[in-house]
Image (spheres, rainbow, N blue to C red):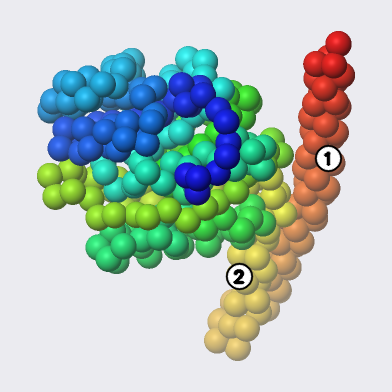
Amino acid sequence: MEDKNLIFDKNDVCIFIPVLNEEDAIKDVIEGFQKVGYNNILVYDGNSKDKTREAAAAAGARVVVQSGKGKGQAMIQAFDAMTEKYMVMIDGDGTELPEEIHHLLYPVLEGKADHVAGNRIAGRTPGAFTALNLLGNRLINWFFRRAFRSGLRDILTGYRAFTRESIQALDLKQNGFVIETEMTVECLTKGQKMMEVPITYLPRPEKVETKLHPIRDGYRISMAVYKYSRFYNPLFFFGVWSLLSFVIALLLAAAHPFITWHSSTLGTAVFFFAGIGAVLLIAGFVADISATLHRKTLKAIQANRKEQEKEYDQF
């Protein structure tokens, strides 16, 4: 894709690398971008205990020590200070290839997308994921696709490209690894054009330790997906509890011959859970209609704003 005849100033593209204890990988990542002509490289360090900052500075990157903790906080801080037209974000652990930047950046430059995410799962190499991490990624992405009616396959990727307008329109609050999920949700909620492209995903270098805890962080991300769904797909949000209530009602009804309760007590319990399930389902339908109308209104406002900007540019 590098041979496309796109004319743009590569200094308008900020390469953003959030890092924490990446001393053994950061130099190669920075030099990888420099080899393909990108020298505007910003490294946000999360108070590393090794020599990550020194290695990044020696390789020619601008280094900022973030004021707080967590990958999400570093990203929010960098996004707020962003002045370039475009930003490409990549992990600093050497698992993604800088030379594949054009796969992500070109759709943004061409106006085909506001936000492009690299699909690591599609291009994973042997050993890139442990069995547990791959299973967790697949389950989280499957859950996300159901909750957000989306076709995205890798919402947790750290290799992304986007415009300044795109990222600054997002309302990001998460400090930890949930930030990638929040970014994706915000893009969908705000009606931005988002697409995925396959990227190569390599095994992590031996000396670079992962900061992601598969069980703890997997649970947090899954709960975040469910929580965010109440705004984008309320029918799913309420439907989960509605389905659970109906299942309990059915199990109680089916267990009637084996339960010694008074029949009226059992019947009351069955009707109670069935009633709760029906109320939650109705609430989901009503909230879903409201959310749909909200998205349509937002799209109309955005379309009107773009039309006004075009008219202003003509004068």
- Dot label at residue 248: 2
Q: Is residue 303 visible?
A: yes
Q: Is residue 150 left or right of residue 297?
A: left
Snapshot quadrant of residue 72: top left
Residue at 32 percent across and 31 percent down: it is: 34
For marks 2 and 1, give the CA distance.
37 Å
Q: Residue furthest bottom?
A: 257
Return the residue at label 1: 296
Q: Is residue 187 above or below residue 170?
A: below
Q: How far from the left and from the top, in percent, is residue 244?
A: 61, 64
Looking at the rendered structure, the secondary structure element under dot 2 is: helix
Looking at the rendered structure, the secondary structure element under dot 1 is: helix
In front: 184, or 253? 184
Q: Nearer the viewer, mark 2 or mark 1?
A: 1
Q: Is residue 287 left or right of residue 254?
A: right
Residue at 66 percent across and 42 percent down: it is: 112
Q: How far from the left and from the top, in percent, is residue 171?
A: 59, 27
In front: 263, or 246? 246
Snapshot quadrant of residue 122: bottom left
For the residue marked with disc 2, what is the amino acid?
Answer: Ile
Q: Quadrant of the C terminus?
A: top right
In front: 94, or 69? 94
For the residue marked with disc 1, what is the amino acid?
Answer: Lys
